[in-house]
Image (tube, rainbow, N blue to C red):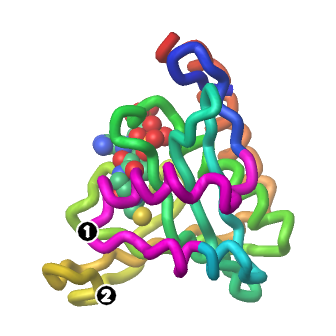
Amino acid sequence: MSAVDGHEIAVVDLTLAHLRPLMRIDALVYPQPWSRRLWKAELGRDNRIYLAAVAGGQLVGYAGALLMIDDAHVTTVVTAPEQQRRGIAALLMVELAERAIAAGATALTLEVRVSNEGAQALYRRFGLAPVGVRRGYYEPGNEDALVMWAHDIDSADYRSRLDAIGADLASRAGVGT
Ligand SMILES: CC(C)(COP(=O)(O)OP(=O)(O)OC[C@H]1O[C@@H](n2cnc3c(N)ncnc32)[C@H](O)[C@@H]1OP(=O)(O)O)[C@@H](O)C(=O)NCCC(=O)NCCS
């Protein structure tokens, strides 16, 4: 388990109670953050996984995925700017992958800005490899999206990968204390 400023980070279901701090963070990291109405609708939909990372009662990150038959499409992963590089997104991704596998998914996929090298490095740790580019996918700016996939996430090999990341995060417990 990682820690932020002495507080253990808990990964829990994202609920309406998290929306106010979530939208504050969203506005800092995304040029076109989702509206409250869209978030509320999303949280009420089936086939979604939405997770919150909470430390000391504060929202420090969140992540989401859309389940489509065998694939879990990761739609968002965010860590509050002042809490980055402390393992929060990795912790969220471990739980997202666990939940996706438990729901029957065999692959993870996502789009990420070609310029977002930090996020790409995070995703590579989770076995996601680039398979193509969607031209002009992101507005504003028409930036290209890199499409990444990890297959066979229900395999023993992938289980070992998640366990290794979990062990690394556990060994870093106390970071920020
Ligand atoms: C991308 C993002 C979610 C990473 O969150 P984070 O909590 O800082 O990530 P972690 O601390 O869990 O990083 C885990 C690993 O990912 C990689 N990584 C994460 N951020 C990185 C960066 N800026 N540069 C290089 N590698 C990075 C590293 O391998 C890191 O391990 P290390 O710190 O031991 O080197 C965060 O920077 C963010 O919220 N960005 C804005 C929103 C966004 O772009 N989301 C992704 C697109 S949907």
* Residue of label 1: 31
Instruction: Report whether 7 appears left or right of 44.
Output: left
- Residue at x 21%, y 88% (from the top left corner): 136
Q: Position of residue 173 (x, y in %)?
A: 61, 18
Instruction: Report whether 110 appears left or right of 112.
Output: right
Instruction: Report whether 169 appears left or right of 138.
Output: right
Cα separation between marks 1 and 2: 19 Å
Mark sitting on residue 134: 2
Give the vertical position of 4 relative to 108 (above or below). Answer: above
- Residue at x 61%, y 30% (from the top left corner): 55
- Residue at x 30%, y 73% (from the top left corner): 32
Q: Amino acid at mark 1?
A: Pro
Q: Which residues are magenta?
A: 12-39
Q: Main secondary structure of the magenta part?
A: helix
Task: Determine if the magenta segment contains residue 103.
Answer: no
- Residue at x 62%, y 75% (from the top left corner): 40
Give the vertical position of 105 relative to 24 (above or below). Answer: below
Q: Secondary structure beneath disc 1?
A: loop
Task: Determine if the magenta segment contains residue 32.
Answer: yes
Mark 1 or 2: in front is: 1
Q: Secondary structure beneath disc 2?
A: strand
The image quarter in which residue 102 lies: bottom right
Q: Residue furthest left?
A: 141
